Amino acid sequence: MCGTSYLRVALVLLVLPVAAQAQDATDELGQQVYTKWCAHCHGEEGDGNGVAASRLKPLPRDFTSGKYKIRMTTTGNIPTDQDLTDAIRRGLYGTSMPAFTAAYLSDAEVAAVVGYIKSFSDWFEDPERQNPETITIPDPPPYDPEAARTTGRQVYEETGCARCHGELGRGDGPSAPTLVDDWGNNIKVADLTMPWTFRGGGTRRDIFRSMSTGFYGTPMPGFHDNLGATPEESQQRMWAIVDYMLSLAGGPMEEGETPYANVLRSVPFGDEIDLENAELFAEAPPATFPLFGQIVEPGRNFYPSAVAVTAQAVHSESEIAFRLTWNDMRAETGGTNGPDLIAPKWDEHLAEIGQAGAASGDTDEGGDFWGEEATEDDEGGDFWGAEEEEAADEGGGDFWGEEAAEEDADGDDFWGEEDGAEEAPLSGTLDTEFSDAFALQFPLQKPEGVRQPYFLFGDAQNPVDLWFVDLAKPSKTVRYQGRGSAAMSPAEGGEDVEVVAGYDQGEWSVIFKRKRKSRGGLSFDEDSFLPIAFSVWDGFNRERGNKRGLSSWYQVYVEPSERPSPVGPMVRAGATVLGLELLFIALVRRRKGKKNS
Amino acid sequence: MNWWIILAVVAVMLAARWRKAGMLAWAVAWLLGMWVAMRYGFVVPVPASVIKIYMGIVVLSLIAYVLTDKDRIAEFWGPIEAFVTEPRYRLLLAATVLLIPAAVAYQIYAGMTAIPNAPFFARTVHPAPPDSITVHGSELALGTADNPYRELEETSPEEFEQRLENGRKIYFQNCFYCHGDLMGGAGMYAHALNPIPTNFQDPGTIAMFREAFLFWRISKGAPGLPEEGGPWQSAMPAWESFLTEEEMWDVIIFLYDFTDYKPRAVEMH
């Protein structure tokens, strides 16, 4: 016995230096990879303060905290190495966190950098945090759209998701504007109608995992085994909610799939276009277009609010109407907006929202929530942030689980209790300096060939026609002629374009109508393609002028109301071919017959 | 090239030879084989119009080949004649006779009900730069200009390192939204842009150019492109409205360093 332990010691002494060397090499590789590929965002020190951080939302993760969003481990736990590897390989959808595919990093490099980012937090060393509990994802039941819309929706409502995510999942719940993460930054609630923007992925399994384990460091709770009396029941209800979300987006999607279109089809609609008619757009195929922040010209908008806009169009003999919808956490219907307002430069913007050393006294103008309120919350301590942190620090217990138990015990509705405290100043619409606004952009004249005006509000030779609506005055269109963003002038004939707009359950909807032919502007002729582009301003995010969310040029195709019927040409061509065939056969047979005889 | 596809096609042709397939089967094999090779054999898809032209050539050569020899004609014609005349093929013949007009009618139906394609602009990705540009008041002859800080790599590595760090900062505060964190052109906004942002990791982009070309593209952006480059649709900003000349040269140094490419040198006169 003695002998063997001597042997062991001797062996260990022999092996240790070799192992340590290998470990050193891995550490060094990890650091190299980190410095080249990660430090500019996540910071040299891993604190999330890289050079890019000041222009990013969400912020790069602070690795010193040990808190990770996307995990297979239950609430309050550190992630597994596989979780971190997956996050690096897949990236975080809808954020700047890229996917480091095999073209960029080898498996060894990823493993090394995983080790390196773990070294920033002592949680990974803490003996009490080792071997965290992980979840398993059961096989999903078949997707049933009908059940998703009924049972799924019911469970969603019962569980209280709507309080943050909104009744229809559009990210407009009453608590949404108040939410902060554990670092004191305001956090935008996920828009559940767009699974392709989910950080952790939008497949059924991904969503099941995100809901089960929650997003550590954020208000998004984990519901693992918590939705029913037994784990099986809980899992069933979980799948029901997952499928409800997917039904909002039009069904399950493949990993990495997005629903974006290039062409909007305007379909014929009867004789008269009546904006009051609820069925006006019932048959018009929707097309969704992605938006991006205006970062091309001064007045840059590094994190626009709106991600996408969905368009539909119908036309009659003489008129054409467009319906545009996009999701917005709140309707800002106070203040003003316009494409010709001066947008602040980036440092001016930071000063406006009380960052970058500007006096913090000027925060009373009710402005940018995402920047300004964060500082306030830091001092005041936001309910959501504080609670989460406490619960987490208590040793990784499931916050929701505990609360839920309490809730059951005294029969009080957990959600209900807080409502009173917080909601009052936030219900309804917000009064801000800048209102929400929208604009459709067309070339002022029909483009010759493929030459279009510059997509950012036109250029000197090729002006654009902007149908602008300030949603504080939602029944009036102002038309602008744009010859570049510094040369926007209100144009004659604004009254030509009728508009109605409304905000409901987190969704803005704007309908424009105009004569198909017009003196000052494009003619929407049938069977033609015309360039179309979109701009969205969110007052909440202090967007105005050139600080906006916008799209590239897309095309609208005005379908002919009468297409020539294909039947005639089909019959003619078919009959001709048949005739030729029969002739051929007859000739061949005759020849053969002759030869034989 | 998709070598597996090409190999499979060659294997089928060899098999046809080896089994001494009839002239008709042989001609059909050639026709199909060429089509498959052309349609699926290349990684970058060959345009449909080009395929059409090549298939025309293949058909003509096959006809010529068959017609130049009596035996070949007989061998080619035999199976066709048998199919049309022999009673045992009657059912198959009837089906074929009906299917062909049906296919033609369907083609016409699809053509008439499909939505026409949106107009497409084939932009020149790398148009020729102008002779000289003026940036922040100073003129630069693009043919001879070079990165004024490139020589620091040799003369003062420390200062070069600083420039590189500065370039990195500029890139990660301005460019990566479009060109991507990895310079692969897949930034977080790339899916909303048309044309898509340039992939600097691709050997066909910055590796082919001199630094002055990049300086032109960066300082003047899309609005500085000639008409064939589609200045109205590219989102590439004119960085002279945000950055100093020095900063633009610094970011160029960073682009090459991060991708491990070398700029093309200025030709000596």
Image (spheres, rainbow, N blue to C red):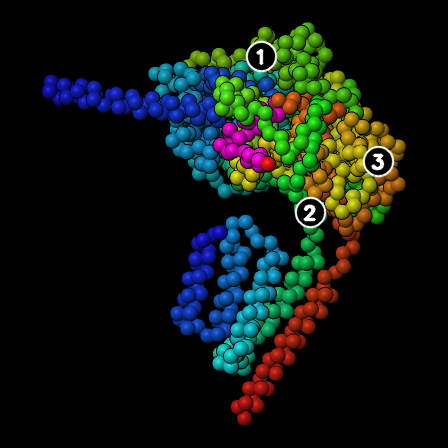
In the image, residue A556 sits, relative to residue B32, either above or below, namely: above
Q: Chain of mark 3?
A: A
Q: Residue furthest bottom?
A: A597
Rounded to the nearest angstrom, the CA distance separating label 2 from label 3 is: 29 Å
Residues shaded magenta: B247-268
Residue A35: x and y in percent read 46, 23
Q: Nearer the viewer, residue A386 or B7?
A: B7
In the picture provided, is A443 more to the left or to the right than A234?
A: right
Q: Nearer the viewer, residue A546 or A576?
A: A546
In the image, residue A379 sits, relative to residue A319, either above or below, namely: above
User: What crowding class fits label 3: few (fewer than 14 Cα within 10 Å), some (14-19), or many (20 or more)?
Assistant: some
Helix or strand or loop: what does disc 3 sit on? loop
Residue A43: x and y in percent read 50, 19
Residue linked to disc 1: A382
Quadrant in which residue A577 is drawn: bottom right
Q: Are marks 2 and 3 on the same chain?
A: no
